[in-house]
Amino acid sequence: MITIKLPDGVIKEYSDEITLADIAMEISPELAKHALVAEVDGELVDLSTKINDGTHTVRILTEDDERSLEILRHTTAHVLAQAVRRLFGDEVQYTIGPALVEDSQYGFYYDFDLPAPISADDLPRIEQEMRKIIKEKIPIERLELPAEQAKERFTRLGQKYKVEMIDDLVKNEGVSSISLYKQGDFIDMCRGPHLPDTGKVKAFKLLTTAGAYWRGDENNPMLTRIYGTAFFDEKQLTEHIERIEEAKKRDHRVLGKQLGLFLISNAVGQGLPLWLPKGTIIRIELQNWLRDELFKQGYQFVFTPHIGKVDLYRTSGYYPYYEHGLFPAMEVEQGQAYLLKPMNCPHHIQIYLSAPRTYRNLPLRLAEFGTVYRLEQSGELSGLIRVRGFTQDDAHIFCTPEQLLEEVESCANLAKMVLETVGLNDYRVRIGLRDPDSSKYTGSKENWDLAEDNIRQVVRKLQLDYTEEPGEAAFYGPKIDFITKDCIGREWQLGTIQVDYNLPERFNLEYIGPDNVPHRPVMIHRAPLGSLDRFIGILIEHFAGAFPLWLAPVQVAVLPVSEKSADYAQKVLKQLQDVRLRAEVDASPDKIGAKIRRWTMEKVPYMFIIGQREVENETVSVRKRKAGQVGTFRLTEVIELLKIERDTRGSQEAFT
Ligand SMILES: [Zn+2]
Ligand SMILES: [Zn+2]
């Protein structure tokens, strides 16, 4: 007897073996037509799976279920492998082809060992073959074979990578049977599940080829990886391709070079950005702005060194648990080892400890643009987004438990203000909680419960849109992360606020309360931008290099039409510099059209064009980025407008 529970509560009973496709058909022919895969007792399986007995919860998935996308992409990867094999013959070795659902560009890849190299030029031909396979609507069948037989089968096919994988599965995981999938003339080894036939693959595109070592090990053969993506309809695919194109144009690594903002030099080291003069201006502007805000909010700034004793990090609990993420310790004196600091907290804690504290001097808010070092894997490094040395807009607030909620709230308000000022208005909040099953966290359950509760209270009070994610906490306490969407819809994690009852305990921090006895303060770790380096990388992409006036490295380009207006151009420059507007005169002999093109490429917010008439009338002809020519104005008048635009950080824009 078979009992099937459906999501709507309906219960169906069958006396004979039945497939999930049959169940779908029985629910409705319409559902059967759109059915892609099924969920049985929480596990995704093929529609062809047979149920023999027992009681099961069953859900039939169509493209409306977001989990179907992974199955679609995975199936498309198999279609790709089949096409490559048809086109390039039996010598093609196919290895693995996973679906990617989190990746912002690619939806799947497949790695091949090919008899002859291929390039991106071959992709249209492969796509064509894939379209044929889709049109053939080949059923995709699952076979379960004893490992030995599966191995024989792939040996016969000359697929040595598959043979190796089976051997490993048997040896390392004690697997005795292997699931194979057959679609027409093609057979692959896979856990599944898949779509029922190749005709269910809809909109797809192959995107690029790359080299990839077998199993990511450089001692192994180099394989050819083909990347692609797939969606359930053409519209989504087209939008995705457009988004990739837009993201390419905005790539901060490309723009950073083109605009002269920063440099990653191999001579210095991977993941260690060097800030060029123009990029440094953006950094200084962000720092000045933030520093002014923090002074207003009662923060005090400190400087601390880039290294500290290993023992300091042992006390904090960071070492040795996170040793793999650190540059190795440096032993400089007998038995005395130092670390490049991975975080600023222990240094700030020492400053707290340097004087007796009472409730009267709390909260103590110590801020620092502190540079920290973390040993990210070289394969993970990417421009300014993943680096090995970066500067945090860090601060630690030491307060009494009674002050905590108000302090967390003002940190959250600061983070909101920061995001809104730079136009990253679309954000959500993620509350990172501890993973109850993990031992990597320090401190008592009571402290953690308390801190998690504090954080929830603040987020609810501020009515922020939030999700809770276990396992995302810092090792010493839970956190609030601000996750923003940029103007092309990509999500970035930025500011963070963390509540910490544990480090104060580990470092034995105290203050004298109104009752004249010692109490334990609470710590807040917070960084509204997170890493300045990463933040600017994100801003470069968000603005596509066209920074708002207050951040633009060159704010005004002064373009004399000819030699005759050169003197006046210098006068204009001087007047701009007098009010700290960053300007450059283009004194090149080029025609005015060429000058405008050059400074358009530089993405400068304003150009002042100066011809004979402007010289005579002491005016400038103003050209605004995007808007183009906006008219001729008295120089003094324009300067006033630009000052307002700069000082209000764009909220009062000139010439709108
Ligand atoms: Zn598969
Ligand atoms: Zn900290």
Image (cartoon, grey):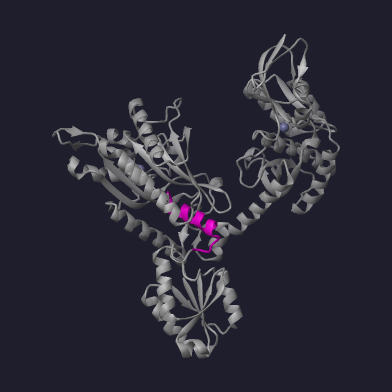
Which residue is at the front of the view, 556 or 530? 556
The percent coordinates of residue 161 (x first, y second) are 72, 34
Q: Main secondary structure of the magenta part?
A: helix
Q: Is residue 156 above or below residue 357?
A: above
Q: Quadrant of the N terminus?
A: top right
Can residue 616 be seen here?
Answer: yes
Q: Quadrant of ligand 2?
A: top left
Can residue 357 be seen here?
Answer: no
Occupied quadrant, residue 82: top right
Q: Is residue 540 above or below residue 403?
A: below
Occupied quadrant, residue 354: top left
Q: Please check the rendered image and state whether residue 539 is part of the magenta-colored stretch, yes or no.
A: yes
Which residue is at the front of the view, 163 or 458? 458
Occupied quadrant, residue 475: top left
Compared across the picture, whether 31 is left or right of 455 comes to: right
What residue lies at 75% left-to-right and 21% top-to-bottom?
23
Q: Is residue 561 above or below residue 121?
A: below
The percent coordinates of residue 200 (x first, y second) are 78, 36
The percent coordinates of residue 109 (x first, y second) are 69, 42
Q: How many marks?
A: 0
**Range drawn in magenta:** 530-547
Compared across the picture, whether 312 is left or right of 1 comes to: left
What residue lies at 30% left-to-right and 42% top-to-bottom?
406
Q: Please check the rendered image and state whether residue 489 is part of the magenta-colored stretch, yes or no.
A: no
The percent coordinates of residue 416 (x first, y second) are 42, 49
Which residue is at the front of the view, 61 or 392? 61
What residue lies at 21% left-to-right and 33% top-to-bottom?
519
Q: Is residue 616 above or below residue 497?
A: below
